[in-house]
Image (tube, helix red, strand yellow):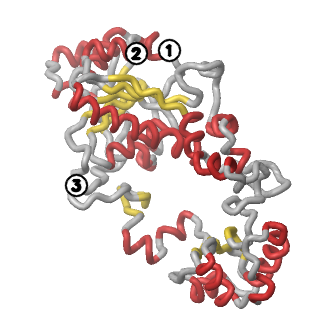
Amino acid sequence: MGPLHGFRIIELAGIGPGPFCGMVLADLGAEVISVERLGAQAPKAALDCSRRGKRSIALDLKSKVGVEALLKLVESADALFEGFRPGVTEKLGIGPDACLARNPKLIYGRMTGWGQFGPLSHAAGHDINYISLTGALNAVGRAGEKPVPPLNLVGDFGGGGMFLALGLVAGLLEAQKSGKGQVIDAAMTDGSAILMSMFHSAHAMGLHSLERGTNKLDGGAHFYDTYETRDGKYISIGSIEPQFYARLMAVAGLPAERFADQLNQQRWPELKQAIAEVFLQKTREEWCELMEGTDICFAPVLDMQEAQSHPHNVARQTYVKVGDMTQPAPAPRFSRTAPEIRHPAKPYGTDTAAVFTELGYSAEQLDALQGAIAVN
């Protein structure tokens, strides 16, 4: 059982960061009950990693009986989180005030892109827009070229779902001492901004330029970049420290007289071209044989399927098979309360009857809810 075993958390189902947050909490042992929209269908739901380990109920939250059922569930919950635009849950009658009135110790998490207030708070948006506003997107890409979206890792997941999970867990810890609940306003703009903290510091110190693709960690340096190999694949080099850089020069056969001036940024473009020509002389596997496991700070650039069979990931069981799908295992690891994936994703509404029976609903009451919930 994971470290969050014993906590009941309600997830008002959405997309992106919310389901990801719920997955992380479920992996860590919480009982996460995903409240799906009545009548929603997902033919490939079993292949959705973000739904693993959760219970699933279906409610019509636009009906009085559906709202009352949710509020009844809130009474037994430790936390609830939602990902609607500001004000939506209030209109439905399940906003923070209504839920905290039923359960004063409840932690109420709110996941949005722009936050609960501010000039843009009611505007539509996606990850790419949120990280644009905080400077994160502008910082990613090659010199002289347009910014490159880093998938939706920075806004939705790193700056969104993970900060929501952190906020919920912190709120749960505080509530155990105070006995009081509170509302967590998790905005992807705030989260992606704080992920840029190191670069704000570096810029203030004169160590990081606002011109992307010219810095030590953004592909500007020849010793911190990806390179194509003879077979059309790629490797990554991160030889920042002098001792690691010296090892790179020795193993790759780079002439010390030409490459010794490592931190001279004026020479980085020239040295990058030179080292690129060297890496094109061997295949990715040949470079792995020479460099992998050394202090060069080297790794092959693998695709998602290749990553599953790499010996290091196999040894650590970084990927596990759940149902018919191989997917990332829970993280991080705990020495005593090991996280686990209790079951694959379930069809929508699978646990509706079970959950409300546990809450004391009679057969007659379940029958009365037929128009508001899907009883399975």
Is residue 370 in view from this perspective?
Answer: no
> For residue 87, which numbered disc appears in the image?
1
User: Exactly how many numbered labels are in the figure?
Assistant: 3
Distance (Cα) linking label 1 and label 2: 8 Å
From the top left corner, tell me how far across and down residue 4 is, in percent. Answer: 26, 44
Asked if the residues shown at circle 1 and circle 2 are in contact, with their CB atoms under 8 angstroms apart, the answer is yes
What amino acid is found at the position of numbered circle 1 in the picture? Answer: Gly
What amino acid is found at the position of numbered circle 3 in the picture? Answer: Thr
Residue drawn at point x = 68 percent, y = 85 percent: 249
State the residue position of label 3: 337
Distance (Cα) linking label 2 and label 3: 33 Å
Name the element at disc 1. Answer: loop
User: Which badge, 3 or 1, is on the more N-terminal residue?
Assistant: 1
Image-based side of 302 in relation to 340, left or right: right
Is residue 202 in view from this perspective?
Answer: yes
Residue drawn at point x = 35 percent, y = 9 percent: 64
From the top left corner, tell me how far across and down residue 27 is, in percent. Answer: 33, 49
State the residue position of label 2: 95
Q: Nearer the viewer, residue 224 or 67?
A: 224
What amino acid is found at the position of numbered circle 2 in the picture? Answer: Gly
Name the element at disc 3. Answer: loop
Look at the image and tell me in which quarter the C terminus lies.
top left
User: Which badge, 1 or 2, is on the more N-terminal residue?
Assistant: 1
Name the element at disc 2. Answer: loop
Image-based side of 283 in relation to 369, left or right: right
User: Which badge, 2 or 3, is on the more N-terminal residue?
Assistant: 2
Q: Nearer the viewer, residue 55 or 44?
A: 55
